[in-house]
Image (tube, coloured by chain):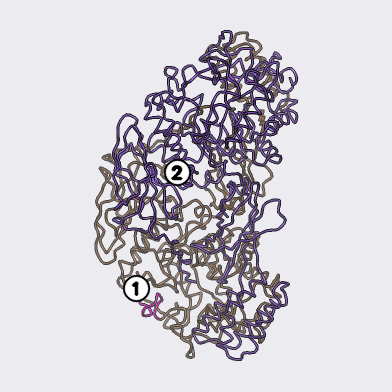
Chain colours: A purple, B brown
Amino acid sequence: VSPVLDGGRFAVKRCVGDRVEVAADVFGDGHDRLAAQVLYRAADAKTWKHAPMRAGENDRWSGMFEVDRQGRYEFMVEAWRDDFATLRDEIDKKFRAGVLAPIDLADARRLLDDTRRRTRTAGTAIAKFLAAFDRSSDSAERASLLLSSDAANAMAAAAQRPFRARSGTYGVQVERLGARYASWYELFPRSLGADGAHGTFDDVVARLPAIGAMGFDVLYMPPIHPIGVNHRKGPNNSLTTAPGDPGSPYAIGDASGGHDSVHAELGGIEAFRRLVAAAAAQGIEIALDFAIQASPDHPWLEQHPGWFTTRADGSIRHAENPPKKYEDIVNVDFFANEAIPSLWNALRDIVVFWASEGVRLFRVDNPHTKPLPFWEWLIADVRRRYPDVLFLAEAFTRPKPMYRLAKLGFAQSYTYFTWRTDKRGLADYLDELNGDEPRECFRPHFFVNTPDINPYFLQTGGRPAHLIRAALATMLSGLWGMYSGFELCEAAPLPGREEYLDSEKYQLRARDWQQPGNIVDEITRLNLLRRSNPELQTHLDVEFLNADDDQVLHFAKGPKDGPGAVLVTISLDPFNDRASTIEVPLWRWDLADDASVEVEDLWTGERFHWNGKRQYVHLRRDRPFALWRVYAPAFSAPPVTPAAAFGDHA
Amino acid sequence: VSPVLDGGRFAVKRCVGDRVEVAADVFGDGHDRLAAQVLYRAADAKTWKHAPMRAGENDRWSGMFEVDRQGRYEFMVEAWRDDFATLRDEIDKKFRAGVLAPIDLADARRLLDDTRRRTRTAGTAIAKFLAAFDRSSDSAERASLLLSSDAANAMAAAAQRPFRARSGTYGVQVERLGARYASWYELFPRSLGADGAHGTFDDVVARLPAIGAMGFDVLYMPPIHPIGVNHRKGPNNSLTTAPGDPGSPYAIGDASGGHDSVHAELGGIEAFRRLVAAAAAQGIEIALDFAIQASPDHPWLEQHPGWFTTRADGSIRHAENPPKKYEDIVNVDFFANEAIPSLWNALRDIVVFWASEGVRLFRVDNPHTKPLPFWEWLIADVRRRYPDVLFLAEAFTRPKPMYRLAKLGFAQSYTYFTWRTDKRGLADYLDELNGDEPRECFRPHFFVNTPDINPYFLQTGGRPAHLIRAALATMLSGLWGMYSGFELCEAAPLPGREEYLDSEKYQLRARDWQQPGNIVDEITRLNLLRRSNPELQTHLDVEFLNADDDQVLHFAKGPKDGPGAVLVTISLDPFNDRASTIEVPLWRWDLADDASVEVEDLWTGERFHWNGKRQYVHLRRDRPFALWRVYAPAFSAPPVTPAAAFGDHA
C-alpha cells in the first residue's frame, strides 16, 4: 500500500484540500474477479468513508480521497472476491459463445437468492430483480437481465464481500497550507531603531507594511529573550565586549528571565502583543525561534541544577565541539537525573506559552542535537492544544536524521539548497526531494541566506547572484526565506568565511531600505507570481528539461498530466549574460515536436505562440531568469491504460 | 533493515553456505559515536551469535553472517551509543590541539570506573587498566593509555550499551543448494518401452546412465498415478479414444486409486522404489508432479463428496474456462463444506507419502489457482517432517502472484523465459529477477520446453535455435530444465499452436536417442561447465554488457567485486552466423580501457590475453555461443569508502 512511511510507523503529510492518491497491490489466487476500495476518515470520526479503487497495470490498484481539515486522517485498503462480477463474466462469455445452459442460469439465480437472504440492505431490490427474472422463461432475456445495471446495483448495495482482506491502518497528517507554501522574512528587531537606538517591536510594526508589500507572509525573528551577560560576545564573535554591546540573542537568559520572557529593550511582552496583532491585521504571521540553550545567567541553572550534568569536579560542562569551546553557553541534559519529566514539560510549556500569545510558527534551532523522542512527544503534545502550530527544523545534518525529524512531526526543514549552485547539484537535489520517501514527509524551506550563512556565491556574484538565488528559491520551492539585507545585496563577508562581516548576531545594523541597486521590485514580483500560480507553491512536480547551456537551469513545474505547465529558465552565471536553446515538453500533451502552443510570458504578461519543441532564450544579468505559462491545446484526460499487460498461460 | 520482505512478513531465502549481507540505517540525534551489530541464530538455537557492523555512506551500516544448515534462521540489528568511542575522539582531538585539561582526564576516568562497577564480564580488566592509569601522573601518558587498544578491549568486553535499540526480528529460510542450482530432465516413462510397449520404471532405470551422462541431476516425471477412463482424451487432445490410448496422466485417478497410487502399467510401487534407489545411486533425484485435479473416476468423488461444490441441480461442476469446457476433470473446492480440515490434510498426506518414499522434489501444477494460505500451511507442515523437500511452482501467471508463491514457500518457479527471445526482453527480465524483492525470494527455473510448450522460436529455428535456448538457459539461470526430445531438436507443432504434434501427453512416443543432428554433446558440455563454474549456478550477479549487434546477447556472471568473471556471448539468430564486438568489463578491476587481461576460452580450454576493452567475436550457427573466464590481474580488495559524504554545518 502507498503512501506509507516505514511500514506505517509514521504518517504521510498533506495540506488541507489535498488529494491522497492511494495505491495497493491487490491480487488473489485463481481467476475470480476482485474488487477493492479505500476506507478513510478523520481520526476523530466514528465512521469510515469509502472511495472506489480501480485495477491498473500489474495488479496495482488505485483510488483517492480528499482531506478537508487539519489533523490526523487514517486510511486502509480493503479488497474482496467479487462473485457477482465473476458470474457476469461467465454468463456473458457463454451467452456470446452460444453455450449458455439452463444450469448456468440456475446457478446465477441461486447466487442472487443466497445474497438476498444474507443482506440487510438490499433484500427488496434483489427480490424485485428475481421476480422479473422468474417472470421470463427466455434464456437470452434472463442473461440480459443478469447483465443489467439493475442487477449490478442491487448486488453492489448488498455489499457481500467474501474473502474480504484489509490492509493495516495508515496515517495522514493534514496541516494548513502554510506548512507547504509560505514566504519568510527574517529580521533582528533591535536593528530597526531610529538613529542608532536599540529597536523595539514597535519599530517592527512600522516596517510591516514594507515587508507585506514585498509579498512576504511570515516574519521570523531570532530569539527575543533576555540575553546573558556572563561571557557575552562582542562584535564579530569576539570574546571581549564594550559597554553597550548587545550580545548574541542565542545566549538566552539573564537574571530577569529565560525562554518565556521578552528582552526588556525590545519593549516587553506588551510591545510583542502589539506586533502580533498588527502583523495579523496585515496577513503576516510571526515566527519565533525555539533555541534550547542557556547563557550561564539563565534562571535554570539556579532553579534546576538537576537538569544539567556535572563533571567529575562538580562543575557544569559548557558547550564544546573539541577543540572549540563555547563558554557562553551551557546545555541541558535531556536524560539528566531530574530532567524527566520536569525539563521536558518545562520546554513544552515554553512553546505552549508563546502559542497562547498567538504564535503558530516555531523555527527550532539545531533540533538534531536533541533527543528524537523528545520532539515526537513535544510536537504531538503541543498540537493537541494548538493543531495549527508548525515547526521548522534548523537541522543542517545528514539526510536520514533530517528526514527522521520530518517524520517525527517537523512540518518544514532547512536544506542544503544554500550550497547547491550548479545545474547538476540543483537538479539532483530536487529529484531527491521529489523521491518516494522524502515527498511524503519532508518539506524543504529554501533560505537564500541566514544571519549565520553568507554564501560564497552571494559574496562574489553581486546583484545578479542575489537575483539568481531569489529566482531559484521562489520558483523551486513552496517555502522560501530571506534574511534582511539580502534585498539590498549585502554580502560583505568575514574574510575567507561563509559569514557576514559585522554580523547582526553581535551588533545593531542600521540600513537604508531604499539603497540603490536593491532588488525589492524583483522580489516583490517573484512573490506575486508565486501567489497567482499554484504550481509554484510546492517543490513537488518539477521536471528538469534540456537546456544546451550548462549554466542555464530549465524546468517545468506542475503535474505531468495537467492542462499546462509553468516553465522556468534561470541562469546560474552571475558574471555573464547567457543564451540557450530550451526544450518545451510538448510530449506531455501528446504533441508533435513541431507543434504550436500558446504561451504567456509571466514576467511581461505578453501572450504569443511557440512553434516547435526547441526555443531560444537570452538571459541578461539584470534579469537572469524568465518564466512562462504554457497552455495545452484542447486538453483532454489521458487515455485509460489497459489493465492486462501480462499473458496468463495457465 | 535489509534483506527484509514485506516488513518481515516473509523470510528471505538463502542456500546452505551462503552469506547473508545485512544492512541497516543507523543514526541518532547529536554527534555521539554509535556502534551496531547483527544478532543471528538458527531459529531452534537458544543463544544469539553476533557479527560486527561497519558504517558506510549516508548512515548505512553493514555486516554479514553465514548460514550453514537447512531451516529457518533469524536475525536482528542492534545499535547503541558508544560512549567510550566518543570519549576517545574527544581526548584525541583535545590532546592534539594541546587543550587537554585535568578535568577531561578526570571525566574519562569516571566513565571507566562507572563501567567497571556495572560490568559482570570486564571488571578485572578495567580495574587493571585504572591501576596503570592512576600510577601515571603525566597527562600525555594518561591520554595515550586511554587511546590504547588495552582500554578499548576492556571497555568492549564490558559491553555497556546505553540507548540500545533493536530492530524487529527477520527470517531467513535456508535451503539446500539444489533449490538454486540443478539441471532437470523431464520424460514420460511410458514412452520408454521396447518395441512400442508401454514403458515402466525399469525402462527409466535403464535410461538413467544416459541422463546422468548428459549432466542432469534431476529426473522429473509427469503424474505417475492411475489415469481416468471416463472422458479420456485421445491423441492430440481429441475427445474420442481408440482402445489402447493411454490418456493424459493429468486426468488423475481411477477405481484402483488416486494420488497415492501408481499407474499399474508403470510397474507399481515396487518398480517406483527400484527407480528411486537406482537414481540415488547415480546422483540423480526424482521429482514428482503434484497436480490437484481429479478425473471423474477418482475415488474422492465417492468417498468425499463434501470436498466438491454442487451446482443448483446437485451435480458437480467440471472444470471450465468459459466458453471452453473440460469434462474430463473435476476440481475440489478448498472451502467446500467438508474441505477443512479433511481435504487439506489429505492433500498434505499425499506429499508426505511420496516424501516417505524418498521423493524430495515436487513440481506443483498450477498452484496459483489454489488458495495461497493452503500452500503456506502445506509447505511449512511438510517441511517440519522433511526439511529438504523443495516445491517448484508451475505458475504461469502475473508477476505478483508468482512472487507471492515464492514468498509463501515455493523454492523455485517456472518463468516467462520461454517467451523472452530478443535481447531487450531477456536483459530486462533478468534485471527484474535480480531486483531488490525478487532476488530475495524468487528462484527462476528456465525450462527450454515442456510437454505443453513447444515455443515458436524452436519450431522455426531448427538445431541452432535449440542450441541458443540451451545456452541461454544454462548460462543465465542456476535452474534449468528440458523435456525429452529437445536434445533431438524435435519441434513439430500442432499447426499454428505453441504445442507439440502428437503430444506425449496423450500417446506413447518411441525415440531414437542417437538420431543424427542431436545436440547431446553440447548439452553435456554446457552442464559440465555449470558444474565447474560457480558463477553459472545462479541467476544472480549478471551484468549485461555492450555488444554492437542487436542479435548478440553479451553478459558477465559473477559478483562485481570478485577476482574475475565468466563472460558469455550468445547469438539470438538461428538463421545466420553473427559477428559482434563485445565489451570486456575492465572497469571492474580498475583497469584502463587498453589494459591486457588473461582469458580462458571455457569451451576450447585455450588460454590467451585480451588487449583492450573491445573484442571481436564470431558466432557460427553450429555453435552460436562462446564463453570465457577473465582473470583479474593481481586482484585486491576494493578501497574502503569514506564514511562521511555529507557536511555537517550544525
Q: What amino acid does circle 1 point to?
A: Gln
Q: Quadrant of residue B650?
A: top right
Q: Position of residue A271 (x, y in %)?
A: 65, 25
Whole-Å distance between the Cαs marked 1 and 2? 48 Å
Residue denoted by label 2:
A431
Q: Nearer the viewer, residue B506 or A158?
A: A158
Residue denoted by label 1:
B459
Q: Secondary structure at mark 2?
A: helix
Q: Is residue B493 magenta?
A: yes
Q: Position of residue B546 (x, y in %)?
A: 31, 51
Q: Position of residue B310 (x, y in %)?
A: 66, 82
Q: Residue at x 41, y 66 (%)?
A: B418
Q: Is residue B589 magenta?
A: no
Res. B363 in view: yes
Which quadrant of the figure contains the N terminus of chain A? bottom right
Judging from the image, mark 1 belongs to the subunit labelled: B
Residue range (magenta): B488-501
Q: Residue at x 31, y 56 (%)?
A: A595
Q: Position of residue B159 (x, y in %)?
A: 66, 30
Residue A454 vertical position relative to residue A30 in the rendered view, above or below: above
Q: Nearer the viewer, residue A420 or A594?
A: A594
